[in-house]
């Protein structure tokens, strides 16, 4: 909180100094009107820049989050091409599409990958007390 108040006073001080420097370029009758006009324009410009920068950062964070989710959902598995070469290559398998069609890096033929889930009954060992 204390840091924020110090920052506010430093910001107002810098804005005032710049306004004084700009107002000194004009005649004495126009000093205060130019000073306040310069002061308000500086606040408006920095408000617009800060708002734009804040929105830019939020947009960037959302983009990085989306890319991270995409990377976490990747399933890289090794598959063997059904051709006579039997080439093994890593494939980015996707569960959200119906067909995963891959081009073999060796023979350049397309082949389809299909994941199957096997189920087995689990047996639990029985322990006897002595
Ligand atoms: Zn092949």
Image: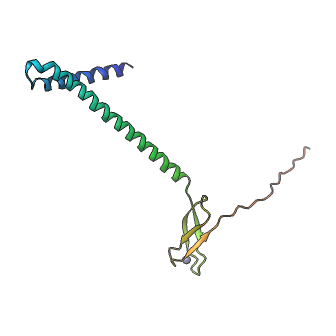
Q: Is residue 28 above or below residue 85?
A: above
Q: Is residue 94 above or below residue 35?
A: below
Residue in the foreground of this view, choosing between 89 and 17: 17
Q: Residue furthest bottom?
A: 84
Residue in the foreground of this view, choosing between 108 and 87: 108
Of the 4 image quadrants, the one containing the C terminus is top right
**Dividing the picture into quarters, in which one does residue 84 lie?**
bottom right
Residue in the image at 20% along x and 26% along y: 38
Residue in the image at 56% along x and 53% along y: 73
Q: Residue furthest left?
A: 27
The image shows a total of numbered marks equal to: 0
- Residue 29 placement (x, y as % from top left): 10, 18
Display coloring = rainbow
Residue in the image at 36% along x and 18% along y: 2
- Residue 78 placement (x, y as % from top left): 58, 66
Q: Residue furthest right?
A: 130
Question: Is residue 76 left or right of 1 when viewed as pictured?
Answer: right
Residue in the foreground of this view, choosing between 101 and 48: 48
Ligand 1 - quadrant of the structure image: bottom right
- Residue 115 placement (x, y as % from top left): 65, 64
Residue in the image at 22% along x and 24% along y: 39
Q: Is residue 1 above or below residue 85?
A: above
Question: Is residue 108 left or right of 29 when viewed as pictured?
Answer: right
Question: Is residue 85 left or right of 29 when viewed as pictured?
Answer: right
**Dividing the picture into quarters, in which one does residue 102 lie?**
bottom right
Residue in the foreground of this view, choosing between 56 and 65: 56
- Residue 4 placement (x, y as % from top left): 35, 22
Of the 4 image quadrants, the one containing the N terminus is top left
């Amino acid at each position: 909180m204390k840091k924020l108040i110090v920052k506010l006073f430093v910001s107002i001080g810098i804005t005032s100094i710049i306004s004084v420097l700009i107002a000194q370029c004009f005649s004495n009758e126009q000093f205060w009107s130019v000073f306040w006009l310069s002061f308000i324009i500086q606040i408006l410009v920095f408000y617009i820049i800060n708002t734009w920068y804040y929105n830019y950062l939020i947009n960037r964070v959302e983009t990085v989050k989306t890319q991270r989710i995409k990377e976490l959902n990747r399933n890289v598995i090794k598959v063997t091409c059904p051709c006579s070469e039997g080439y093994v290559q890593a494939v980015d398998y996707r569960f959200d599409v119906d067909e995963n069609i891959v081009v073999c890096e060796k023979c350049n033929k397309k082949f389809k990958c299909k994941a199957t889930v096997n189920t087995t009954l689990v047996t639990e060992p029985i322990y006897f007390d002595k």
